Image (cartoon, rainbow, N blue to C red):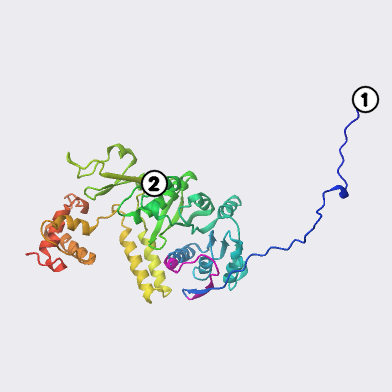
Amino acid sequence: MLSLPLQLQPLSPPFYPANSQPKTLKPVFPKACKSQYQTERGLQFDIGDTFFRHESATGRDFGVLSAALYKQSNGSLRVLDALCGCGIRSLRYLVEAKADFVLANDANENYRGIISGNLSRISEERWVVMNSDANRVMTERYLEKDYFDLVDVDSFGSDSSFLRAAIGAVKLDGLLYITSTDGYSSGGHRPQHSLAAYGAYVRPMPYSNEVGLRMLIGGALREASVLGYHVVPLFSYYSYHGPVFRAMLQIKRGRLPDSSTYNFISHCIQCGNSQTVAWDQLGQIRCPCITNACVPNSLIVSGPLWTGPLHQASHLARMLNLAEQLGWISDGNGRNLEKLIRLMVDESDPKLPVGYIKIDEVLKECVASRAKLNSPSIGAIMNTLHEVAFSPPLCSLSDQDPPIALETFDLTAWANILLWETPSLGFGDANN
């Protein structure tokens, strides 16, 4: 039987299925946002229908100060604002930090008009607006080897999926400004969630705000290590609204040189003591208060977390000096900014342990059996501790004597010093 070769030919145009009711397609334009003008640090901008919070101004101040200092030290500044919203951060980086170029990105196409309008007062060659997924934008910059001096990722919740792409888009020794607004995880209420997002199993501790910052920095450190880098916190900042945890990190080449800054934290619910626990000590965790009569399961352990300094004092000092030069300290809000930065300088001492002790709770335990007394102010307590620390018995110690650590002192003894030797602090009459 003779077989014929099979030949396929495309259908001629008349045989393609046709739409019996053709419709004219209209171009789709982004939805226009309603104009709502705001002012921050003398700059007027339109927020439209974007998500905007006045309370986040301090975090924006910190970002601008760090960016401006980077520009002063390195001569150039290119910024990637990955989730820019209305574009106020991009605008402030351009005007106040004098950025050479800003890539302002937001996935919502409806915001393009608002962002472009806010940046339009700046020469167009210094900025560009994109509407794309943040991870895609940062990954593309990495693949193109188009690195930025500062990458600002103002994300929502505990979305840590941005971290690796953001680190890849930053120049070596550049800056990464990251965010978390997940108060549930930092409070230890979703340990499985914090483990998935930041690689840290976080349990409830009395200083959850600090834990939130250490969790965020630790998560960034973990991602940086995968890429062969490590991070150095220049400052970290917590704000009650949201809540919001922000950290400015410097990206350094090489993995973390000192493992003592990425460990676990334990807290004793019996005595209130907190301590850092190294990886090789996990099977030997013991609170100094533990005795045979100790409450079972009194230790709470969270981690791994960043256990190093939360701030760099030298960077904060430069930030404060620049804020004064810009005139940001002269008004009422400026005084709050100055107070906050000075407090952060005090917190940056690398000798400080993690966590803190609630003075009210300690004093209640110490004096419950003696009298009902009111707690003094923190300032009064600190002044008294300074007086005691520089008293003749302590000042007479020689260089050969072992150092005295505050955490080794008996808290009851300290309370006795405050209560019975300084009745003027507001405790009432110590003789009653």
Cα separation, mark 1 vs mark 2, equals: 75 Å
Q: On the rendered structure, is 20 left or right of 427?
A: right
* Numbered tag placed on residue 2 in the rendering: 1
> Which span of residues is magenta-colored?
42-58
Residues packed near mark 1 inside 10 Å, few (<14), some (14 to 19) or many (20 plus):
few
Amino acid on which the number 1 mark rests in the picture: Leu
Residue at figure coordinates x 41%, y 69% from the top left = 322
Residue 301 figure quarter: top left
Residue at figure coordinates x 47%, y 62% from the top left = 70
Residue hosting label 2: 191
Tell me, yes or no, whether the highlighted magenta stretch contains residue 47: yes
Residue 254, visible in the rendered structure: no
Tell me, yes or no, whether the highlighted magenta stretch contains residue 91: no
Residue 274 image position (x, y, % from top left): 27, 49
Q: Give the camera-side residue of 180 and 254.
A: 180
Q: Check disc 2 and report its element: helix, strand or loop.
A: helix
Q: Earlier in the sequence, mark 1 or mark 2?
A: 1
Residue 399 image position (x, y, % from top left): 18, 52
Residue 117 figure quarter: bottom right
Residue 50, visible in the rendered structure: yes
Q: Give the camera-side residue of 404 and 73.
A: 404
**Pointer 1 and pointer 2: residues touching (CB < 8 Å)?**
no
Where is 282 relative to 321, above or below?
above
Where is 3 relative to 386, above or below?
above
Amino acid on which the number 2 mark rests in the picture: Pro
